[in-house]
Amino acid sequence: MGHQFIEQRSIDYVPIAERHGKVWHLWPVWFSGDAHLATVATGVVGVALGGSFAWMALAVVLGCAFGTFFMAFHSTQGPQLGLPQMIQSRPQFGYLGALLVWGVALIAYIGFNAFNQILAAQTAHTLYGIDSKRAIMLGFTVLSLVLAVIGYDLIHIAQRWTAYVLIAALLIFTAAVVVRTPLSPALLSWGEFHNVSFLAQFFAAASYQISWSMYVSDYSRYLPRTVGVSASFWWTYLGAFIGGAWTMLVGTVAAAVYPNMELATALRTVADGVIPGFGKPLLLCFLLGLVTITSINFYGASLTLLSVMDSLKPSRPTLTKRMATLLFAAIAATAIAIASSQDFVEQFGAFLAVLLYLFTPWTAINLVDFYWVRKGHYSVREIFNAQGMYGQWNWRGLLAYGIGFVSMIPFFSTPLYTGPVAASLGGADIAMLIGLPVSAVVYVIACRSLDIGEDRRRAHAADVGLDPGAAAHAD
């Protein structure tokens, strides 16, 4: 079937007749989604705190393996429901209650993109000595917006070709580092184990991967419903884990070899050291990845804004509204980036860490509801019904979220606040390990009073005739 050049759908349901694509297309979306400069920076955290390269490399791999597990399970929801990720929160939190997590998501999207724009300007300065920060940021934003405006199909294609370029660059760099670096014996030495730096790097990597959860099924929702949970999980997991861990390890290497250099400069110096002249192309490849992930953030911000608008005043999502929300997100992110000082960037980075704490209870509640409580049985029509079966405010999800978040506070460790337990652990942050199980358990207990049989019956009855083309496209 043919597809329109500019995506017409936004937060609305994707009918079976419009489903297309292959499940393997998920791996390049998330490989490229993780292979860029912001991910490189995540791999520096532990070394900056005094950890040895070998221990920090292990923390990166384990942290990515842990965080990607949750993110990949969210990806499997897309083909089953045909809906964007954030709108799926209404059954757990209520029609209006879902605004809680949407507000957090919107701030995260815009904040991450402001950081990406600043990072792009710094890289352009490192590569070409360009001092016009505003011009670089505006050009970078326009490129990202083009992908986001055209939408789903172009984002998939761009991520696929970006993945091939990045794999080639990473293979060349990795092989050269292994074969040619004179510091490899020192780098491979385990050295003394520091629990604070190890845990900081582990949870930085895990949190970074979990942060994709808020929009991962946006990029699987057009896949055929016949795509299985296992296939969509593993194609997402492999792409995100390999892309994330590999790219973070590049940052770990750069920080270990040149701990006193600014990241982009250190990365270029390492690359030039192993292959003269390779530093510039490597940075350009990572900059390409930064463009595409910024477009994905704008796309997600647009879908979230449309969800907020629909909650406040139910209305049909249109292409014009999607364009308007994209423009709003771009203006907001660019304004923050242009107004930012270096101190602000550091403070905002700490604020984004708090936003990731805010997503930990949500990811637990959303996954438990989908796989354990309702087992994927939802009504698409009722999700968009302001007076529907899921209610305006769902006390079960809100209670589990509140208790889960409060349970993490003593374990927080950020420049803004350090909880008593984190302080007693020397600053080690294990908040996520607390928030995930507490939120999940409280939600399961709260749902014991929910009549699952009646809930499923009402959901199925509400969606009779929703998708007349479903039978014809069942195969």
Image (tube, helix red, strand yellow):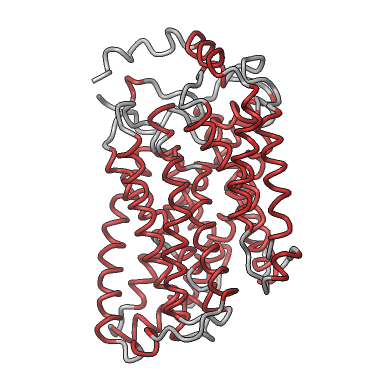
| Residue 353 percent location from the top left of the image | 63, 59
Compared to residue 242, the image places residue 320 above or below, namely: above
Which of 309 and 435 lies nearest the eye of the viewer? 435
- Estimate the x, y position of residue 198 in percent, counting from the top left: 53, 72
Instruction: Name above or below for residue 250 compared with residue 186.
Output: above
Residue 374 rendering spot, x and y as whole percentages: 51, 25
Given residues 171 and 430, the one toward you in this image is: 430
The C terminus - image quarter: top left
- Which quadrant holds the N terminus? top left
Drawn side of residue 321 relative to residue 235, left or right:
right
- The spot of residue 402 in percent (x, y) is 72, 41
Which residue sits at x=36%, y=42%?
Answer: 233
Quadrant in the rendering for residue 82:
top left
Q: Nearer the viewer, residue 280 or 72?
A: 72
Locate residue 341 relative to residue 363 in the image: left or right: right
Count of numbered tags: 0
**Res 36 quadrant in image:** bottom left
Figure check: 91 above or below 43: above
Residue at coordinates 26% horizontally, 86% vertically from top-left?
A: 180
Image point (54%, 30%), residue name: 88
Q: Nearer the viewer, residue 145 or 259?
A: 259
